[in-house]
Image (spheres, grey):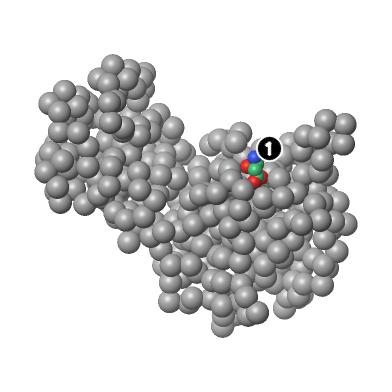
């Protein structure tokens, strides 16, 4: 008989959280994840059952790619019915990218998938790993009326639970490394663990988990800057097999109104390349048509990324390109919130 305690699967992909110092070189290297419980005996005191699984070769998250995301999705899919929640241990550098991508790959998720990591290795005296890991497991174990309280992909770091596809890593040094500028925190850990229930994602009732593993990375990301040249832009648009480009524009979605710039975008849209406009600001939204400098973009058929993060914009693009959908539907779907990534 299944015990009434929540059953949590810890998935270790790599990153600082599972690293120890090589005393000879001073460099951080991965340790055997099976010894995790020796490093954090407190885990045995939690009111849940914990199982662990690790990537065969844990990686620094700078080496994350589509295949690694599929590996995480496979682990979750294979064990979905046997566990009440999943905690993914991941390097912080690309955690927002992976967690955002997974939010699109896991459709109709009705269990928690909590990404976490740390700024200091688990063996360090001042480590932030223990709090991040312990609270992530507690969050993943929360139940409301016999069902998991959290039913979406989240990121937990330094006392805060965020919707994963709203996060960005903003600090390479502070324990408070992540932020979610355009959406509320989902929970806060203080003396009490306070969940902001009204901001949680509500999945469609009774729909079965669908795992999407076809992602297409024939894309480019361009951050515009004053002085950007035609030659640079053209070389990106000339990339073989290119299907879509995300442009990080200024402020509320503004770009140069120079004729060469607009013509280049127009030509590429006419040959079927999707162009998505997101803002390089960490907070706020693209509002095409608000200024003259964005009206032209709207008129030539640029897709609005609204208030999406760069990390989620990339994941959503790779996911939608893998779906073989018509250009009209593509624009509508990109501009519609699929997993709570847009306001
Ligand atoms: N470079 C590490 C990684 O992202 C940093 C960390 O773990 O936070 O894998």
Q: Is residue 198 above or below residue 95?
A: below
Pointer 1 residue Cβ closer than 8 Å to ligand 1? yes
Q: Residue at x 56, y 43 (%)?
A: 94
Q: Quadrant of ligand 1?
A: top right
Q: Is residue 211 above or below residue 224?
A: below
Residue 37 in the figure: left or right of residue 204: right
Q: Is residue 311 visible?
A: yes
Q: Is residue 83 visible?
A: no
Q: Is residue 33 above or below residue 62?
A: below
Q: Which residue is mark 1?
A: 59
Q: Is residue 299 above or below residue 170?
A: above
Instruction: Tell me where residue 58 appears, x and y as whole percent.
Output: 72, 39
For the residue labelled by badge 1, is the local secondary structure a helix, a strand or a loop? loop
Q: Nearer the viewer, residue 251 or 118?
A: 251
Quadrant housing the C terminus:
bottom left
Q: Residue at x 35, y 34 (%)?
A: 223
Count of numbered circles on the image: 1
Task: Count residues near mark 1 (Cα–Cα under 10 Å), then give few for <14, some for 14-19, many for 20+.
Answer: some
Instruction: Tell me where residue 226 appears, x and y as whole percent.
Output: 28, 31
Q: Residue at x 76, y 75 (%)?
A: 47
Instruction: Tell me where residue 283 appears, x and y as whole percent.
Output: 36, 55
Residue 33 in the figure: left or right of residue 308: right
Residue 116 in the figure: left or right of residue 195: right
Quarter of the image where one finds residue 261: top left
Quadrant housing the N terminus:
bottom right
Instruction: Tell me where residue 178 appears, x and y as whole percent.
Output: 53, 55
Quarter of the image where one finds residue 128: bottom right
């Amino acid at each position: 008989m299944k015990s009434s305690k929540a059953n949590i699967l810890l998935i270790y992909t790599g990153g600082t959280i599972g690293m120890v110092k090589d005393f000879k070189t001073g460099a951080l290297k991965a340790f055997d994840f099976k010894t995790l419980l020796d490093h954090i005996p407190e885990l045995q005191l939690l009111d849940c059952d914990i199982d662990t699984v690790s990537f065969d070769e844990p990686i620094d998250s700078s080496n994350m790619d589509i295949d690694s995301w599929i590996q995480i999705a496979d682990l979750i899919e294979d064990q979905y019915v046997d566990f009440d929640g999943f905690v993914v241990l991941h390097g912080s550098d690309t955690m927002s990218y992976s967690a955002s991508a997974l939010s699109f790959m896991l459709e109709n998720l009705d269990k928690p998938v909590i990404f976490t990591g740390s700024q200091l290795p688990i063996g360090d005296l001042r480590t932030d790993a223990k709090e991040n890991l312990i609270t992530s497991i507690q969050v993943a174990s929360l139940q409301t009326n016999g069902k998991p309280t959290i039913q979406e992909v989240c990121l937990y770091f330094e006392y805060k639970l965020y919707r994963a596809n709203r996060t960005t890593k903003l600090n390479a040094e502070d324990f408070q490394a992540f932020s979610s500028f355009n959406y509320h925190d989902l929970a806060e850990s203080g003396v009490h663990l306070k969940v902001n229930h009204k901001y949680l994602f509500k999945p469609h009732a009774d729909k079965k988990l669908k795992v999407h593993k076809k992602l297409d990375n024939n894309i480019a990301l361009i951050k515009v800057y004053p002085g950007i040249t035609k030659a640079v832009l053209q070389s990106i648009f000339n990339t073989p097999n290119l299907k879509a480009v995300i442009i990080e524009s200024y402020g509320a979605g503004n770009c140069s109104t120079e004729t060469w710039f607009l013509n280049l975008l127009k030509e590429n849209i006419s040959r079927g390349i999707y162009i998505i406009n997101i803002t390089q600001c960490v907070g706020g939204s693209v509002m095409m048509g608000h200024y003259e400098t964005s009206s032209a973009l709207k008129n030539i058929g640029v897709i609005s990324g609204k208030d999406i993060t760069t990390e989620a914009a990339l994941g959503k693009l790779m996911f939608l390109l893998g779906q073989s959908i018509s250009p009209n539907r593509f624009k509508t779907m990109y501009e519609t919130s699929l997993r709570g990534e847009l306001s």
